[in-house]
Amino acid sequence: MQKVFLLKGKEKPVLHHHNWVYSGAIAKQDKGIGKGDMVMVCSNEGKFLAYGYYNEDSKIRVRLLEWDENVEINEAWWEEKIRNAYTLRKERVENEDTNAYRVIFSEGDALPGLIVDKYDEYLSVQFLTAGLEVRKEMIVSILQKVIPVKGIYERSDSNARTLEGLGMSVGVLYGEKPPSNLLVKENGLLVNTPIVEGQKSGYFLDQRENRKKVAAYTKGMKVLDCFSYTGGFSLNARKAGATEVWSVDSSASATEALSSNYKNNQLDCNEEHVITSDVFQFLRAAQQKNQHWDVIILDPPKLAPNRQNLPKAERAYKDLNLQAMLLMNSGDILATFSCSGSLSLEHFKQILAWAATDAGKELQFLEDLGHPIDHPVRAAFPESYYLKGVIARII
Ligand code: SAH
């Protein structure tokens, strides 16, 4: 196997089982290593450290998979990893109320670049690295074997592929194409999940537990669900007994799907409260009209795509939360989230504190929210921890 040698002093993260080796940590390497090839990563002196796959076109030059020199990374190795990840979800997540969840969460399951979501009888899969791109066929055949489904659909249309020098790739990999009216079960609710046409892999599975936790505050309340997408939080709140739920999203196809999701669950839907609009504008207009809700949910898209954008994103998170707080009174609940990996929970709470000061409100943190079981974070790779939120109260 071809070898990559690290610079002196750069072994530490590798020894701690971090998955990434940056180009800047490499001293030299054997000639002719192909895109996606498996390599042996060695210390400067040539001592074995780990196996991983290589990509000359990426700043993350090697993604590490195995730290035991005696283990061969063959088809059986991949199958065991995939089976292991699936078993956790089968045992801990799937039940009669929920048949949609993340089966493989990239570095969180020690399989860098691989995302597999199960939506009832279909899989939505993302191959985000060159090392996986060249092993796609093998991985699809293992998935078929381990997880019996009707169809496997590829949604490798994430920007992460560009950083790997890969183009976008979507389409059926096995079996049937998922229907656009596919209904999956989450928390006992039926949710229309357009795997082919939807955002990301079709639905935002990472908020399943948080939807339940937030819904617990909504009985008898008037709720505003901002960045609602197809209604994850709205439906859970309605089911929990919210008297009125308003949902706002800038995507017309998302709000359309949201309306049909109410019908799928025999829940009343007031079409006037399903609003296709920019949330920032909606909140400012609501202040002019003196509108009020008892519970406000803010689940924006990633506002900080990377660390460089953090200062700008900080201002956006602050403005968003400030605009919401300006609408709130004593006793009202704010459930607010960030899915920017580069923003820590502590930093996010600091931003909320600044927003509260500017809004002239006293904010009290009730619950910290994070990842569900099907989005596990490996101790060696804390960067996986991207979703954080709080439930807070104005006192
Ligand atoms: N809360 C949702 C997931 C939200 S994902 C759930 O539980 O499933 C973020 C959503 O924000 C997307 O649906 C996207 O269409 C929407 N969005 C992005 N920018 C927006 C803006 N400025 N105003 C309103 N919606 C926006």
Image: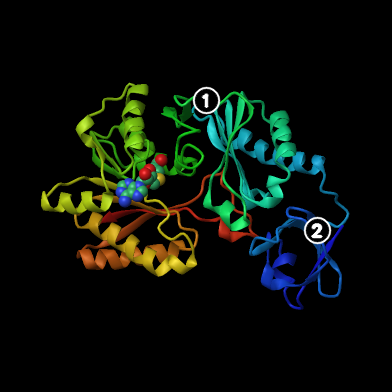
Residue 379 image position (x, y, % from top left) = 63, 58
Of residues 266 and 393, the one drawn nearer to the viewer in this rendering: 266
Q: Quadrant of the N terminus?
A: bottom right
Q: Is residue 1 left or right of residue 293?
A: right
Residue drawn at x 40%, y 63% is 348
Of residues 305 and 237, the one drawn nearer to the viewer in this rendering: 305
Q: Residues within 10 Å of mark 1 (few under 14, many from 20)?
A: few
- Whether residue 268 is visible: yes
Residue 203 image position (x, y, % from top left) = 46, 38
The secondary structure type at the circle numbered 2 is strand
Instruction: Please state which amino acid type lies under the numbered disc 2.
Output: Val
Residue drawn at x 63%, y 34% is 91
Marking on residue 96: 1
Q: Where is mark 2, residue-wise?
A: 39
Q: Residues within 10 Å of mark 2 (few under 14, many from 20)?
A: many
Outermost residue to the left: 289
